[in-house]
Image (cartoon, grey):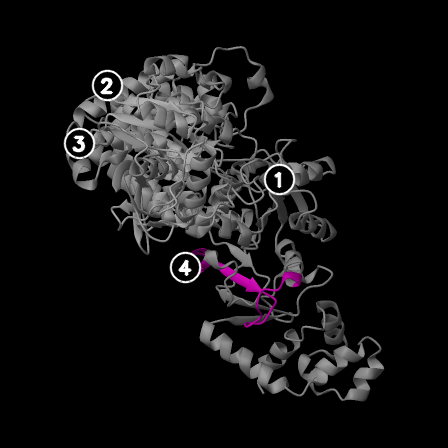
Amino acid sequence: MREVDYWLWLSSLAGLGPVKARRLLEVYGHPQVIYHLPEEKLKQQGLLTPKNIEEILGREKRERIDKITDLMLKKDIKLITFLDKSYPEKLKHIYDPPVALYYRGSFALSEFSVAVVGSRRTTNYGSITAKKLSYELALRGVQIVSGMARGIDSIAHEGCLDAGGKTVAVLGCGPDYIYPPENARLYEGILGAGGLILSEYPPGTPPMQYNFPARNRIISGISSGVLIVEAAQRSGSLITAALALEQGREVFAVPGNIDCAYSRGTNSLIREGAKIVLGVEDILEEFDYREEKATVTGNGDTAGRRAGNTASGAGHKLYFGLSTGEIRVIKTIQKGIHHIDEIIQHSNISISEINNILFMLEMKGVVAQMPGKFFELCP
Amino acid sequence: MVSKVKSCVLTGIDGCVVEVEADISNGIPAFDIVGLGDTAVRESRERVRAAIKNSGLEFPVRRITINLAPANLRKVGSVYDAAIAVGIMAAAGAITASEPDNFMFLGELSLDGGIKPVNGILSMVCCARNNRIKNVFVPAENANEAAVVKEINVLPVRTLLEIIAHLNGQHLITPHTVDISDIFRQNTPSSVDFSDVRGQAHAKRALEIAACGAHNLLMVGTPGSGKTMLAKRLPTILPQMTFEEALELTKIYSVSGLLPYKNSLIPSRPFRNPHHTISDTSLVGGGRHIRPGEVSLAHYGVLFLDEFPEFGMEAVEALRQPLEDGEICITKANNSVTYPARTTLICAANPCKCGYYLDSSQKCSCTPRVLKQYLGKFSRPILDRIDIHAEVKPVRYQDIEKKGEEETSGAIRERVNRTRKIQLERYVGMGIYSNAELPPALIREYCRLDRTTASLLRRAFEKLGLSARAYDRILKVARTIADMDGSDSIKSRHVAEAIQYRSFDRAGNRG
C-alpha cells in the first residue's frame, strides 16, 4: 500500500471526528501505524468508543481505499494531508482541523482571503451587495472563499470570477459532487479560472445535511476574515460567524433595512460587535492591506460606464450620453427607491415613459431589473 | 286527426324549431311521445294529462301519439309541455286558430294547468324570429327576457287556458315589450371603480393595455397586494357592451339558467371568478347535459383565475383551445355543441407557495424544491396565450392615506374606446376585433418594425435572454401601445414598454 492510501483510509472514517483523528495522529505519528493497530491497543487508548474501534478494524478497508483512489484518478482529485507542508497554516490552528483535504484545481491559497457567506435565499439588495463586494475585493487581489451554496455563496463566487479572481469553494460533500446541481456552470467556472474546490470528505460522499455546518469551520478556518452579507435570524451563516469568532477571525457584516427579515441576522451581528461594512475599505483597513500590493486589472472599462455610486467612490457619478429623464430615474433609484410604482411617484414621470426609460437604462447596462419589478443600479 | 304546432329545441345557445305533431286515433287509450326525448320529455305525459284535466278541459280518452320532429335531434327538458298540450287540444278539435303556423309554444306545465318558466327562452325566441314565426307564447316570468327580441309578438301566459282562450279569440293577450335603451341607461354604474385603487401605476397601466388590445394578463404579487381588486375593475374599463354582444351573452346565461327571471338583458360585462378546485368540465363546459362553462359565462367579459398555479392541470390545459378560437366546441357521443367564449383571461398568482418570495419584510418559508415546483407551473403552455405579465406590489399605508386624485374608470374607458375603434377600423372585414387576436401572418403585416426598432428588439432578446415565445407577444402588445399613443407605426418606445410586460420570459426569472 502506498503511504497516501493510509491517509485516504483515515479521512474516510466517517464516525471518527477530526478531533479524535488528530489525537490518534499525535499519539502514533502516522495513519499507517493506526491502520495496523491491534484491537487490544485501540481499546487501551481510552479515547475511542466501541463503534470507532469497529470502524477502524472494519474489514472492507481495502475496498474503500480502492474506491476512493479510483474516483480520485477519474475526477482528477488530489489530496493534501495534515502533515504536508502545503496544508494551510491558518487551518492548522483551529480546534478541529480536518486530517486531510481533497481538492480539485490548483492548491494555491492566498495569504489574504475573505470568506463571503450569507443566506441561501436572498433579496435583490443582498445579491447586488454580495456581488459588488466580492467583485471589488477580488479586483484588489483578495481571494474569496465561500461554500458554493445557493444564494449569497454562489453570488460571491461569481463576483470573484467576474473580476478574474481565483475563488475557493469549500463543499459539504465530496469534491466530485456538484451541489446544488444548478451550480454546474459555476463549478466549472471556478476550476476554469484556476480556482479551487475543496472538501474534507472523500469523493463519493453525497451531500448530507449534517455535513454542511461542519464545512463552515473550514470556510472560516482558511480565511482571514468572514463577511456575512445577508442572514436571517437563526441561520447557518450565523453559525459560520460564531465559528469565525471562536477561531479568532474578524467578522464583518453588511447592514440592512431593520424591517427586512434577511438582514435581521447581520444587523444583530453588528449590534454584537461585528464590524459594519459599508464598502470594501472597511474590510481592507482591518488587515492593513495595501492596494498596490495587488494587481488591479480590468477595471477601466466598467468604471467608465458606471453611473451609480460605487462603494469606493460614493457620491461620484458619471453620466455619459444619458437623457435628463434617465438621470432623474437613476437619481431616484440612488435614493433607495427601487420599485417601479415608487419610482413613478418620486420622479413624477408617467408610467409609459418610465417603462421606456428603465428599459433603455437596462439595455445600457446601467440598471438591472429584479423579480417583482424592482430596479437596482448595476455595480 | 293530426295537429301540428311549433316549439323549440336548444343546441348550444341556438334554437332549432321543433314541430310537435299530435295524432289522436281510435284504439286502446294510450299516450306516447316519440322523437328522441329524454326522461323529462317522457314525464311530460303525466304533466300534460293532469294540466289539461285540471284546467277544466276534457283529456281525450283515445290513442294519442306525439312526435317531436325532427326526430334525429335529442330533445331535453320540459319546454315542450305547452306545445304538447296545445297539440292534443288542437287534435281533439278544441282549438280553432286560423294560422297555427304563426305560433310557437314554450313553457313547462304545472299539474294545475299553470305555466312555469324555462331556461333558454331568449335563444328560442330568436329562433322563432329567424324562422319568421310571428307569435310566441312564453311563460309570464320569462316575458322580459323574451321581449328583447324585436319584430315578434311575445305573449306572456300564466295558464294553459290563457293560451287556448287567445287562440280561440276569446281573450286576446297584449304582446309584451321592453325598452332596450332603458336597460342600458338604467345599468347602474358598477360599485367598483379604478379610482378605488391607490398607487399601483404599473399594474394599472398593464390592465389598461390589456383592455385596449383585449390581451390576456398574468398578475404576480404577494397576498394582499390587490390582485383581485385590480382584476375586478377590468370590466369597468372595457368598452360598453353593444346590444348584439349583450344579446349573445344573455343567451348563454339564459341557457344555463343563470338569468334572474325579472331581468331581460345583461347590459354589463361579466366577471367570472371560479375557485381553483373547479373541474375542467365546469371551466370550459360539458357534462352529461351539456352546459356552458365559466369560460363561456365570461363571454365578452373577464375570466379571472386567482391562485392560478393551484388550478388543476387538466382544467387549465382545456382552456387553451377556447382562448385561441373564441369559442368552445364540446362533442359528446351523439351531440356536439359550440358555445362562444371570447373572454379576457386574467391569471393571478403568488410569487411562491407561501407568497412571500418577493416580500423582504417576511421570510419566505419555501424550500428550493417547493419553489422550483411552484415556478414550474408558470411555464405551462397556457402562458403562451398570455400577452402581458404584471407584477403587483402591496401598497404602503402612506399611499392609501394620500389624498391625490386617482383616475376614474370612466376616463380610462374613454381611452380604451378610442384605441379599440382604431383596431376595429384597421381589421374591418377580417373577422378580427383586437390586436390580441392577430394571427402570425397578420402580425408580420401590421406589426412591422423599422430598422432601428428591430435592432433594439434583437439586442433586448440577446441581453435579457428572452425566450422565443415572447416575440409575437411583444409585437402585439407594442401594436396596442402604439395604438394607445395614436401612432400608425410601432416606435422603439412602444417596443420598449411592451418588453417591460414580459418579465417571466427573462432568463433566470422563472418560466
User: Which residue corresponds to mark 1?
Assistant: A262
User: Which residue corresponds to mark 3?
Assistant: B446
Have a look at marks 4 and 1 and say if they share a chain.
Answer: yes
The image shows residue B405 at horizontal and vertical percentages of 48, 10
The image shows residue A288 at horizontal and vertical percentages of 61, 41
- Cα separation, mark 3 vs mark 4, equals 48 Å
- Cα separation, mark 1 vs mark 2, equals 46 Å
Chain on which label 2 sits? B
Of marks 3 and 2, which one's residue comes earlier in the chain? 3
Q: Are marks 1 and 3 in contact (CB under 8 Å)?
A: no
Chain on which label 1 sits? A
| Label 1 vs label 2, nearer the camera | 2
User: Which residue corresponds to mark 4?
Assistant: A192
SS at circle 2? loop
Q: Are marks 3 and 2 in contact (CB under 8 Å)?
A: no
- Residue count near mark 3 (Cα–Cα under 10 Å), binned few <14, some 14–19, many ≥20: some
Have a look at marks 1 and 3 and say if they share a chain.
Answer: no
Q: Residue at x 41, y 51 (%)?
A: B288
Chain on which label 4 sits? A
SS at circle 3? helix
- Cα separation, mark 1 vs mark 3, equals 48 Å
Q: Are marks 4 and 1 in contact (CB under 8 Å)?
A: no
Query: Along the line of sight, which residue is nearer the eye, A38 or A282?
Result: A38
| Residue A195 within the segment the image draws in magenta | yes
Which range of residues does the magenta coloring cover? A184-210
Chain on which label 3 sits? B
